[in-house]
Amino acid sequence: MEWQQLEYFQKLANIQHMTRAAELLSISQPALSRSIARLEDELGVPLFERQGRSIILNRYGAMFLKRVNNIMQEYQDGLHEIQELVDPNRGEVSLGFLHTLGTNVVPDLIRLFRKEFPDIHFQLIQNHTHTQLKQLKSGELDLSLLAAMEVEKPIQWTELWRDELYLIVPIYHPLAMKKSIALKELADESFILLKKGYALRITVDEIFEKVGITPKITFVGDEVGTVAGFVANGLGFSLLPDGEEINPRKIAKIHISDVKCERIIGMAWAEGRYLSPAAKQFQKFILDFFEARKKAVKEHK
């Protein structure tokens, strides 16, 4: 059995189309067919069901594919480990983060980091908290920037910073002149929030619950920018962290006085799982960055 046979089998198993798989492998279709036939002869079982021009992975093929995927992953991991040991300033970091952090926080961190480590690259994944936790456990992600949560081993989470959440209203609304307001005063107002499942939505729901309000929700959105845009056009209020989406020419932000209104953001990783030198460099950079920021804030006070 040759390594090339495993590569060809994996590609065909994923594509399940002989012609397209051959094109992607840059070989002829007969050459691919011969390679698969030799592999089946060595294993002593067929791996595909052939129905006319269609080729479908059978149960033997599905079982073998799991093993081949593991072999290929182990090979890639070994290759990466060796390359990174030779040069720890190179490599790739797989970083997950909440949708609401994609406007400025994550781009700023990566921009500053790459000034020091220009040859380290990133694979970026925006997703919900629960999905990112699964991706950390599976090894698909190295690090994640997530809201405060209850985590179970092997996941580790450490706080990085806190954002105040403000009531945001259209700039022309009578409340826009206020410096602060009690959330209880807004029980009859309409709100625009992110969809359920988003970390910020979970936090906002908990805040409303603390003051005993069930908000009237008129619209829900996928992005903070969408929510802010609806607010700017007078379609409701919202609770959001300060950011580039809060255009001061269109939106006013007001401090909430009767309940602690904030979100807590931290970094998560899977304890015991291999972290490349590049990922460790970025992990340390993040911890140092936010520790320095906390000290600067204390000194300013």
Image (cartoon, rainbow, N blue to C red):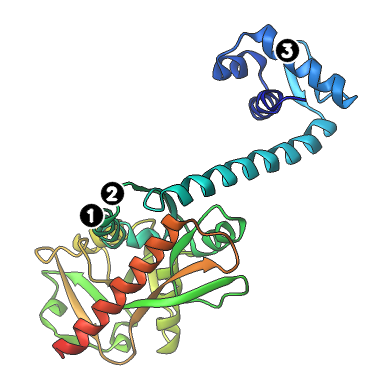
In the depicted structure, whether residue 288 falls above or below residue 48: below
> Is residue 238 in sight in this rendering?
no
Residue 9 appears in which quarter of the rendering?
top right
Kindly identify the amino acid type of the residue bearing the numbered disc 1: Lys
Frontmost of labels 3 and 1 is 1
Q: Is residue 144 left or right of residue 191?
A: right
Residue 17 image point, x, y percent: 66, 19
Picture coordinates of residue 33, whole percent (x, y): 73, 12
Give the residue at the far front of this rendering.
86
**Mark 2 falls on what kind of element?**
loop
- Marks 3 and 1, the one that precedes in the sequence: 3
Describe residue 211's horizontal placement relative to residue 254 as left or right: right
Whichever of labels 3 and 2 marks the residue nearer the N terminus, that label is: 3
Placement of the N terminus among the 4 image quadrants: top right
Query: Image quarter for residue 184?
Result: bottom left
Whether pointer 3 and pointer 1 mark residues with C-beta atoms closer than 8 Å, the reply is no
The type of residue carrying mark 3 is Ser
Q: In this orientation, which residue lies closer to the viewer: 255 or 97?
A: 97
State the CA–CA distance, disc 2 to disc 1: 6 Å
Q: Which mark is residue 201?
A: none
Residue at x-position 30% and y-position 78%: 291
**Residue 258 in picture, x, y percent from top left:** 30, 92
Query: Mark 3 — residue?
Result: 33
Cβ–Cβ below 8 Å for labels 2 and 1?
yes
Q: Nearer the viewer, residue 278 or 260?
A: 278
Checking the image for residue 118, the label placed there is 2
The residue labelled by disc 1 is: 115
Residue at position x 60%, y 67% in the image:
272
Q: CA distance from mark 3 to mark 2?
A: 44 Å
How far apart are the two marked residues, 3 and 1, measured between alpha carbons? 49 Å
